[in-house]
Image (cartoon, rainbow, N blue to C red):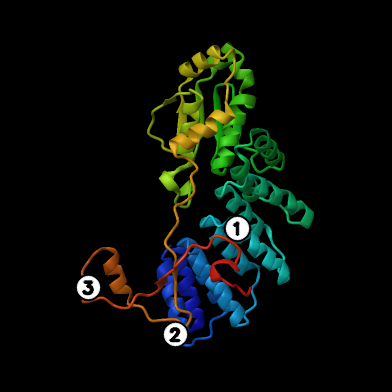
Amino acid sequence: SVVTYNATMTALEKGLQWERALDLFDEMKYKNMPVTVVSYGSAISACEKGYQWRQCLEYLDEMTERKIAKNVIIFGAAMSCMEKACRADIAFQLMERMNLEGVRPNVHIFNSAISACARCKLWRKGFELFKEMDKVGVKRDVVTYNAVLDAVCSQVDLAEQIFREGVGRGFYAKVSRLGTQWLELDLHFLSLGGGETALRWWFEKCLVPYLGDSKELASVKSIDIVTGYGKTRARGARKGDDSMRKRVRAMLSFMNICEVVQPNLGRIHIDKPALMKEVERNCGRIIFDAHGYEQFKSQEGLDEPHSDAPQFVRPRGGALHDRAERDRQKINVPGPGPGPGPSRPSQDRFDGPYQQHGDSRRY
């Protein structure tokens, strides 16, 4: 039944088996089953997992042709796809289309748009969207603050202002824990840009009483930064295996702060004697060169955009797929013979408004 297909597609999509989910959707259309808005929602979410932004647009086009009304969930899934595929330009146009179709954007729409700005290095546009949320009455959440901090982290003063606002709203209330014998910075629930901002703020502002007083610092037994690891730090794949741990270690290295090697991969233990020497050398503080750090990140290959994923467009009428044959091809196992491909590769990369490159969208 349609319900069974929809549920299975959703399960496959959430299990990162996005191609199999789209195969089932093709099968539904091939069998002339009544596809619904839920079916398209699952298919578009599967496109997100495979960075298939062009197929996502095809599905939106199909919905218009079939006269299936798009709701905020459909647009949200499409926005997430554009975000993951670093297509901020199309994300902005989707927001315009939502306005034309009378669909009111929610916090998820804005969060995806701001995250797309972060991935595409459009910090001004990301901050503009952040401010726009107040104007249109959309309440910001912790994801909003993480997204905008990703976008503006290179703008030190602005990033710290937004971070302090997030602290004031209770989103990062437990990020810094300062005791008489231990100091801890917890970056568990921050984005990479948020983690950079928090780390800079911690050393430059929070630890000043300790760094400026050698006796206070000498009495501290442990200085730790919690980055999270494994199940508590679930992230999508990033270029160069970028992660909070990798980013924090790079930032500490740039500030000439050493760590003590220890087995807990979710925690970085600061070398206190080396830190005391660095603080003494800098007259009781840690100096952070924001411009130099951006150059350092570039040299280290951090914060680079995803490489373009190959784009494939499936036949609109649906198809039946030999999934076993395709799986054999993926692992280079010879099969009984070549079969028809499940989709055709996209001929050109979409780089502008929908009207360019012969791409005319009706949604």
Q: In this view of the protein, which residue sits in the foreground, 75 or 290? A: 290
- In percent of width and height, residue 132 lies at 74, 52
Asked where in the image residue 343 lies, by quadrant, the reply is bottom left
Q: Please tell me whether mark 1 sits on a helix, a strand or a loop.
A: helix
Task: Please name the residue shown 45% across and 56% down the image.
Answer: 308
Q: Amino acid at mark 1?
A: Asp
Q: In this view of the protein, which residue sits in the foreground, 338 or 166? A: 338
Q: In this view of the protein, which residue sits in the foreground, 125 or 78? A: 125
**Of pointers 2 and 3, the one earlier in the residue sequence:** 2
Q: Is residue 41 left or right of residue 269?
A: right
Q: Residues within 10 Å of mark 2 (few under 14, many from 20)?
A: some
User: Would you name the residue on which mark 1 appears?
Assistant: 89
Mark sitting on residue 27: none
Q: Residues within 10 Å of mark 3 (few under 14, many from 20)?
A: few
Residue at the extreme front: 357
User: Would you name the residue on which mark 2 appears?
Assistant: 30
The CA distance from mark 2 to mark 3 is 25 Å
Q: Amino acid at mark 2?
A: Tyr
Task: Please name the residue shown 53% across and 68% down the image.
Answer: 56
**Of pointers 3 and 1, the one earlier in the residue sequence:** 1
The CA distance from mark 3 to mark 1 is 41 Å
Asked where in the image residue 139 lies, by quadrant, the reply is bottom right
**Badge nearest the viewer, 3 or 1:** 1
- In percent of width and height, residue 328 lies at 26, 68
Q: Amino acid at mark 3?
A: Gly
Q: Please tell me whether mark 3 sits on a helix, a strand or a loop.
A: loop
The CA distance from mark 2 to mark 1 is 33 Å
- In percent of width and height, residue 99 lies at 72, 67
User: Would you name the residue on which mark 3 appears?
Assistant: 335
Asked if residue 178 shows in the view, the reply is no
Q: Residues within 10 Å of mark 1 (few under 14, many from 20)?
A: some
Residues at circles 2 and 1 in contact by the CB criterion of under 8 Å = no
